[in-house]
Structures are given as structure tokens and as C-alpha cells.
Amino acid sequence: MAEATFSSLSSSSLKSSLQQTPPGNPVFVAFDDKYRCVVCNGIVREAVQTPCGHRACEQCIFQLLHGNPKKVKCPAGEETCSFLVLSEIHRDSGARREVRLLLVFCTFKTEGCEKILPWKDLQDHEIMCTYRLVECRFSSEGCKVVVIKRDVEIHQKQCPFRLESCKFCQQEIQNQLVQEHLEKTCPQYVIQCTYNCGTNPAPRVQMEQHSKECPRRPLKCKYHSIGCEFTGSEEEMEMHTRSETDSHIQLSVVRNTENALEVLHSREVTQTMDVKITELEHLLTKNLQVIEDLKGGVDTMKKAMKDIKLKVVAQTERLITVERKVENLADNEAHNKLSRDMMMIKETQNTLEGRINQLERAGPMGGSNGINGTLPAQIQQHERQLGIMDLRMAELDLRFQVMETASYNGVLMWKIRDYLRRKEDARTGKTISLYSQPFYTGRFGYKMCARVYLNGDGVGKGTHLSLFFVVQRGEYDALLPWPFKQKVTLMLLDQENGTRNLVDSFRPDITSSSFKRPTSEMNVASGCPLFHFQTLPVYKDRQNLSDIAW
């Protein structure tokens, strides 16, 4: 009872505290101990008074008493202090009002503000204080300087990051980068020819074009590709070509010799590669022949395994038939005869199973005795058949998992994972539609599933998500009324906050073949080809979309 009372007191006081003690930890002009909390020894906030007359912060008292199984004595530690009882602790409105009126220094006193004012007015003063620290308005350009508000305009006029328009190209450049801009990048800044050809100075954009055609621009020797490193003007290049003819001929001879050696080396490598290719072709031909032989052995093994499985199935069916007959016969003699027959059949089945196990244990090097005495030497490939059997077992395991997760209350919760990848597969035609796991209206009810076209179907192709309901052939269809008449509701669930679910429902058309008793594995799907318009903002803002739930 005491704990509930304290929670109520704390809750009501906490709501009013936003209008009581101001925020922050200011520097007080004078601080009287009567405003000191007996628990935290700081300024009392949302003052409450103990039965012994001491003051404390409401939050401090809450933390002191909350969840403490023992009695707590007033922290003041005086002889007159008593144990604290929540029902005897009251709000001290007078102290709260006095604390709000305590004089404090401005928060920016260290910056030069000499203002002294009541604590309750401090927050409003801080907003208007001219000594408040502010960032330069060019901080987005890289300025890290923080100045007081009254000096910010002076700083911004001198800030090296302030933007200025180039007087040549009118582009806005940081003040500290103006000179660099003029010297390196400004397209309209007037410069001289780099090669000092005597052309009149011109804007950089024109001079760059001139440099490509300047008669004094340095040219590489036309024999540079074979080793000549000479560069010079057109006139110098002509003189070089005439004077260095012998040198160029010598470089050409050396390069031709090198090319000849490289050609010889390439021929040797090519011959070696031809030999290796011939060897690989021979090996490939040999491997292809081995593969053909192995395929023949696999086919033979498949046939043998199929015969064994057929025999096992036949014996099992005979055993089941005999057991049913035994249950219905009352004559002891017939019963005993059938029991003996059943035992013989069981022994035959056990023998077959033992032989199959023997073949499996024999592995690829096993013998050829027993019922497989006629199998060819390729019995060594039996391990591959065991792998196929493992795959079939995996398929059966998957079917059991589907059966275990099946719903029998008429509701299917279908979550499609990797939505974006599956949507792309549907768009490219790789996987046009998806089927859900089956679900049922009851343990012996209708069998159904859902079919979805993530890129739409029919009139909704490319623009909508199409969702359909499918009636499947079930084991108890003969016991159910047809056609299917139950109401079908389709819902696309919003996985963020559940406020934007998409819902559509319909009643089956009893004349449609989609809702008659199935004669094949499943009926033609029926539903909503325009169920969900692809550009609706249901999931538009979800950048990490991977699943969609129904």
C-alpha cells in the first residue's frame, strides 16, 4: 500500500516538476544550506520534506526508498530524525518556489557576461545572451572557430572560409583559396604561353588550346618507341632527325634483334603448348570413354535397385493383406495357417532387406553373391545409388516438415523470404509464381494453398502483385460438401506498425470450376490479379526489405 502511494506521489510531482525546478547546474551567487538535499548534498530539486523537517530531492527519496525491504532512517543523522515512512513525506511547495528565485550567474560568465538573475529566468537569458558561444556560419565550408555571439559578425567578415566570387569567372571560392584558384584553375584568368613563344597573354581556357598547337611546344622524337629519349621544338626536332640518323638506325637494329628473339621464344612456347594440348585432348577422350562406361554401370544398378524395391513393396503389400485377413477370420485352423504364411512372408521380407543391407555395406568393392549375383562388375558405383536414396529420404523429410507446419484452422500465415530476389526472378521469367504450403479448414476439412505472382499476372502483370486462392485435392474430399462456399479473405500484412494492412475478400462463385471437387492435384487458382499496386508506399521506405508476410 505504501509503495502504491509513493508511486502516485512521484508520478504527480514529476508531471509538475517541469514547471518547478529549472534545468541545469548553474553557479549560485549565494547558497544557503537549507536548500541542500540531505541525500545527494546538492541543491534540492522538486523539494519534499521529511517528518523530521529535513528537505530532500523527490527523486533522491524515491531511489532511497524504492525496493528497499528495510526501514530507512533520515540521512541527516540527527537525534531527532526518525525512520522514513512514505505516507509522512510531503511536497515542500514553499522551498520549490524559493529555489526558483535563487540568484545565479549567467552560464557564460567565463566568456564575459556579468548578468545575475533568478534561476527561473536563466534559460530564457541564455538564448538571448550576447556572450553565448556560436559557430561560424561558414562551418559547413570547414571553419571550426567558435566565438561569442557579439563577435560573430566581425569573425565572419575575416573568416578565411568565407565565400567570394571570382572577379574573372564569377565562381564562388573560399577566400583562402582565391589565389590558388587564379593560378591553377580559373578558366578566364589571363596567363602567358607556357612555352614563351611570344603570343599575347590570353584567358587560360584559350591558352590551353593554344598550348596544344604552339610551335615551341616540346615534341617527342618519332623514334621514341624504340628508345630515343630526345624532346624539343619542331625546329629542334628536324635538326635532331638529320643529325642522329646513324643512332636511329642502330636503335632500329637492336629493336629488330630483340623482336626476333621474342618471336623465337614465342614459337618455342607455342610448340610446348601444342604438345600439352594434344596430351590433354587424349586424356579428355579417355575420360569421356570412362564416363560412358560408368553411365552404363549406373543404368544397370538403377534397374537392379528398382527390381529389389518392387519385390520389397510386393512382399509388404502381401503382408498387409494377410494381417487384415487374420483380423477378420475366426477359425483357428485358418488363423494358424495364415499366421504361418505371414511368418514366411516376414522372413522373406527380412531376407530381402538383409541382402539389400549387405549390398549397401559391400560398397563399391563388394562381391556379387546373393540376389545380385548377376550384376555386372560396375556394382562399385552402388554408392552413387545410395546418394540418390539419400535425396529421396530428404524429400520425404521435407514432406513431413510441411505436414508438421500445416495449419488446420483455415488460416495461412505465409512469409516470403528474400522478397527482392524473388521479385526479380518473377520479372525476368525465371520463377513466375510461388505456391505456399497447404493448409486446411479442419483436421478432415478442405485442403487449400495460396499462389502469388510477385510481378503480376494477366491484367496486373508488371504493375501489380497478384494473389490467388487454390483448392487442392484432399484425402477427405468424398466426405465434404461441394462446391466450396466459404468466404476467402486475402491480407498483406504491414510489418512495421500494423496500420497499413491491405485486405480483400470474396465469396466463391459456385458455378466456377475453381471451387468444385478437384479431379486433378489442384483446381484453377482464383483470386485478385490486381491485389497490390507495385508503386503504393506500403513498403517504399523500407531500404532493407527482404521479407513480405501474408
Image (cartoon, rainbow, N blue to C red):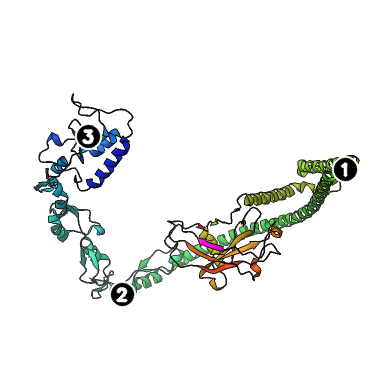
530 to 141, vertically: above or below: below
- Secondary-structure class at tag 3: loop
Q: Is residue 115 magenta?
A: no
Identify whether 418 is placed above or below 20: below
- Going 86% across and 44% down the picture, which residue do you hit? 329
Residue 405 location (% of width, % of height): 60, 51
Residue type at mark 2 is: His
Secondary structure under tag 1 reads helix
Q: Say which residue label 1 marks.
A: 338
- Secondary structure beneath disc 2? helix
Mark closest to the chain's N terminus, 1 or 3: 3
Which residues are drawn in magenta?
480-491
For disc 2, the marked residue is 210
Q: In x, y percent, where is residue 547?
A: 50, 57
* Left or right of 1 in this view: 360: right
* Alpha-carbon span between mark 1 and mark 3: 94 Å
Where on the picture, by quarter, is residue 364? top right
From the image, give the main secondary structure of the stretch colored magenta: loop
Question: Which residue is rendered at x = 26% and y = 41% of the image?
Answer: 9
Q: Amino acid at mark 1?
A: Leu
Q: Which residue is mark 3?
A: 40
